Amino acid sequence: EDQVTQSPEALRLQEGESSSLNCSYTVSGLRGLFWYRQDPGKGPEFLFTLYSAGEEKEKERLKATLTKKESFLHITAPKPEDSATYLCAVQAGGFKTIFGAGTRLFVKA
Amino acid sequence: DTEVTQTPKHLVMGMTNKKSLKCEQHMGHRAMYWYKQKAKKPPELMFVYSYEKLSINESVPSRFSPECPNSSLLNLHLHALQPEDSALYLCASSPRGGMGETQYFGPGTRLLVL
């Protein structure tokens, strides 16, 4: 059965303290892995799409990487405004997109 | 422009009411999606429309009825809902509904069923 697991569930950082969020997946035939940011009560905001192992993408303080079993979202020198829930999702053999439970990030000034 | 709009932002309804949620996109996308999200949980897929045809129904109860009048519009008709249906309802769109496509989400409609 296709599965997506994100860790940690919650992460508390000081401003400027870099860290990484993990997304492990077990799917048959990965078609795409997606990272979204979601603020409370709002819709997910698209960050990155990764398609193959070794691929990396960057946007401001965020960098996403992909291996055959997991993806990392690296946050460099985070700011309080980076506080949000970060969702990882995968699309495999079917058309259904499977979301992980998310990592809630809190960045303190 | 990667904007998906949803109306209303908030909706309160009784269990005997009939209401509709509306979603609109002007990105030329041909696939549109409805998701349901409970508090502190990930989004769960409900329906997928591809080229205005229903392609996926994730065993959603019949009290939820989707409609896709054209490629830019998606509605979700609600009737005789239960309190446990209270959630954030998210609409998303993607270029063609093909595999590996990025989905762009709207801001959601917060629904409360009394």
Image: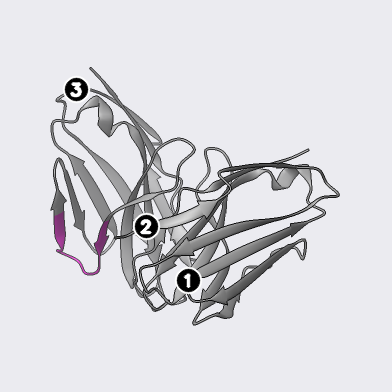
Magenta span covers which residues? Answer: A48-57
Q: Residue drawn at (40%, 37%), measured in percent from left and top? A: A39
Q: Nearer the viewer, residue A73 or A46?
A: A46
Rendered location of residue B58, percent (x, y):
63, 68
Q: Quadrant of the C terminus of chain A?
A: top left
Q: Which residue is outermost to the right?
A: B16
Residue A15's mark? 3
How packed is label 3: few (under 14 Cα within 10 Å), some, or many (20 or more)?
Answer: some
Label 1 is found on which chain of the structure? Answer: B
- Kind of residue at disc 1: Ser
Residue lying farthest to the top in this orientation: A109
Neighbours of disc 2 within 10 Å: few (<14), some (14-19), many (20+): some
The residue singled out by tag 1 in the image is B72
Q: Position of residue A72 (x, y in %)?
A: 24, 49
Label 1 Cα crowd, 10 Å radius (few <14 / some 14-19 / many 20+): some
Asked if labels 3 and 2 touch by Cβ distance under 8 angstroms, the answer is no
Q: Residue at x 56, y 67 (%)?
A: B74
Provide the secondary structure element on which disc 1 rests.
Answer: loop
Amino acid residing under circle 3: Glu
Percent x, y of residue A28? 39, 73
Does the segment drawn in magenta span residue A25? Answer: no
- In three-dimensional space, the C-alpha distance between marks 1 and 2, rounded to whole angstroms, equals 12 Å
Q: Nearer the viewer, mark 2 or mark 3?
A: 2
> Could you confirm whether marks 1 and 3 are on the same chain?
no
Q: Mark 2 highlights which residue?
A: B3
Query: Per the image, is A52 magenta?
Result: yes
* Front disc: 1 or 3: 1
Residue A17 occupies quadrant: top left
Q: Amino acid type of disc 2? A: Glu
Q: Which mark is residue A53?
A: none
